[in-house]
Amino acid sequence: MADKKKKGKVTAAFKAIGADIKDIGTTFAQGDWKTRLSFLIMGFGSFTRKQFVRGFAYLGTEVLFILYMVLFGAKYLKDIGTLGTVKGGYDANYVYTYGDNSFLILLYSILSIFIIIAFLFIWRINVRDNRNNQNKLSVPSNKDDLKSLLDERFDKTLLALPMAGVFLFVLLPIVFMICIAFTNYDATHQSPTNLFTWVGFENFKNLVSLKTGGFGHTFGTILTWTLIWAFFATFLNYFLGMAVAILINKKGIKFKKMWRTILVMTIAIPQFISLLYVGKMFAADGLVNTYLMKWGWIKEAIPFWTNPTLARITILFINLWVGIPYVMLITTGLLMNIPEELYESAKIDGANAFQTFRKITLPYMLFVTGPYLLTSFTGNLNNFNIIFLLNQGKPQSLELTGGAGYTDLLVTWLYKMTVNDTNYKMAAVIGIMVFVVTAVISLVVYNILPSVKDEEGFQ
Amino acid sequence: MKKMKKVLSLLLVMAMTFACLTACSKSNNAGNGNDKGGSSTVSTEKPTLADYGSGTIKIWVADAAVEFTQQKCDEFFKANPDMAGYKVEIQPTGEGEAAGNMITDVQAGADIFGFAQDQLARLVAAGALMPLTGYYENFVATSNDAGAVGAAKVGDTVYAFPITSDNGYFLYYDKSVVKDPSTLEGIIADCEAAGKNFYMEINSGWYQTAFFFATGCKLEYTTDDTGAFTGSNITYASKEGVAALKAMINLAKSSSFQNGSSVDKATNLAAIVDGTWDASAAQAAFGDNYACAKLPTFTVDGQTYQFSGFGGFKLLGVKPQTEQGKQLVCLALAEYLSNAETQLARFKALEWGPSNLTAQADEAVKSNPALAALAQQLAFTIPQGNYPGEYWTDATSLGDDVIADKFDNMSDDELMKVLQDFQALEQSYAK
């Protein structure tokens, strides 16, 4: 069913493009000489119809576009197939001349492609404009045009700048990074001395390769741990946080405010400080081990950070300490929202505490906090801070390639690869994988959330 | 009229956008100036120009050295008024960071920058260093100790000016705890008895070689002049390698052993394998019991070895320049910042041990306890060559496996297998 729907969407998109091209054709065939000339000289039709503002905008766009391509874009775009061939070098006096720079070629080529698409879009508007005006007796005047930008087309005026920003600072870097995954950009192929080039799916093959030096085994290990981590970090925090909140909410508990304040203190101290400090506390020569040894409870230091399994458990444990107060704060208010009558009638019916929790509290909480659970799960998949501040993904092992450690998440591994090993190509591949994992999980979980499936559930 | 104004302003905005886009493109002459050699005659005269032009020279040095470097630059331009058209801009950038930043963007990087020599091959491969020839090659080769000269070379080409010869490690210890610093077993026994810690960062590729080089293992890479690794001579998978690995495993078993190499981060410290940069911190930590010594010996299977390790150096590099005038000024300035007087002054101001032979012979340098211990240890060390970045990562993995007790119950044959894999991995980086 869903498959069919998707196929339908794709064919519809192609059909729309086909229809658009056909429309351009008919516009030309049926157009008068003004319209036809506008295909080449943008804005010509508008000028002849005294729409100077539009005319200047179209013509200006065309002139700017041509200038951009001739002076700047073309020289990068022409090399996009090879990403540069001329290396830099010294002359007899060791004065250096910079050659091609693969990095800049790729970056500006992508920018140029975006600009071409934008230009085609504006050109299309120009053509459509002519077609519309050709059949009309009166066309909107300059004044009307400008006015409409502040009136019925005010959305376009407002969104112009943010859209340009999104293109430049979000879309361009993302496309650039995706492209890097298909090149051999690493420590031995760096600008400006060395050039890098396209290698197709080589890096993706390497990611799943189980040969020595391949990333397959390591990727499997890290991905598994990332998922285990995200699962436990989210749900342990959630249930224990809720338990703490219920406990404090219980009638008969004294000093409620004090208990809450104590827990919230962990939020008040910036994680950067507290995590670095706690990480140090559990080191082999840290506070915990030193005191345990001093009191004679243990003889050898407990390898909190150096033993792979123990390191993972320690991280999950410390994460509880960081996460429980947040969940407690969120759930405290929600718990008070559950109608008291429900509990009272349950009591009369003879339900015990566990039954009321399972049948009343939990469904309500899951319904309200479903979206929070999802965001916190995806947040935990990429929880760089906790891992990196506590133990930098250590311990490493010869069994893992690419400098990965047993507590590394995909995202911290990616960081190490770029910063320590200049392995941009594999980092880009991992980046894509992080996106895929996050996207798949978010979409699947989102669709099974009670708050999405049954919007009216608790109203 | 009003309409025209609006149109005009619209055009202006567009023009500005366009200007913004084009401003990013520097004059990027795609010309290939790769006709090195040919007409150039190797001269040992200091190259000069009638007019050096003017401009700004960007310098990156470690935070602690900024003031010192500024002062020396001022002196340089006072002494060379013909070059005074240039201004210097000194930015504090740590040695490790400098290499990373240069590699990320050579064109925007500093003209002169300080770095530790383990980064040399990486920098050369990224095209961030200009080769030194003629007069300057001669200057580096004749005025510094042999280790430092070797460290400034990739292949047969000199790429940088050595400024210190103190990047090595030795033993700082507490006299009241450690009675005899000559054997590792003795030190460990003293530390365990006192319930204090012995620090050595065995999961670092830099400190780890103290074991492997001691038993006679080799870890050498050959590079061509562009910084690419072309060959290797590694003998970790050997009897000697197993002995070294066993020594590491034995050390890691001790309850006093801690993995680390920073006095500031150590607790309950009795002895630490560390370098001269921590001298004042060690002095503060040990107080009157402060003492330094060369590294001890260790015994494996009845055989005794002297700890070895890397001798390391700090270097000053010049970025490839596109103008002759600026290039010559940069070179002359880098020479000045690395000559005997500057190195001696730097030792007095910052306690950085000089690489210059004349400066090393100075009494003040000779009588410093930390530098004296280092000088003793340097006799047993191997000048640090160039290693692929992956080596450092893999060495950490090996060390982490040792600390995680993965090898504790392994037989010699199994350890040999581990080292064979390690060696094969390291060999795979040289093509």
Image (spheres, helix red, strand yellow):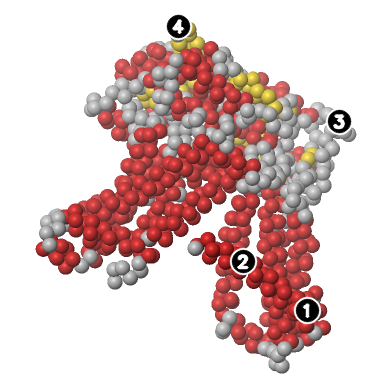
Rounded to the nearest whole Å, what is the CA distance between mark 1 and mark 4? 95 Å
Residue A308, x across and y down, in percent: 40, 33
Q: Residues within 10 Å of mark 2 (few under 14, many from 20)?
A: few
The residue sitting at 64% across, 35% down in the picture is: B122
Furthest residue toward right: B39
Give the mark nearer the N terminus: 2 vs 1: 2
* Residue A286: percent from left, percent from top: 34, 33
Which residue occupies the foreground of this view, B398 or B121?
B398
Of A355 and A188, nearer the camera is A355
| Label drawn at residue B302 | 4
Name the subunit of mark 1.
A
Determine which residue is flagged by label 3.
B41
Specify the amino acid type for callout 1. Phe
> What distance separates the C-alpha of mark 2 from that of mark 1?
26 Å
- Establish whether labels 4 and 2 are both on one chain: no
Alpha-carbon span between mark 4 and mark 3: 58 Å
Residue A5 spot, x, y in % from top left: 53, 65
Circle 3 chain:
B
Label 1 crowd bin: few (<14), some (14–19), many (20+), radius 10 Å: some
Which is more toward the observer, B326 or B267?
B267
Q: SS at mark 1?
A: helix
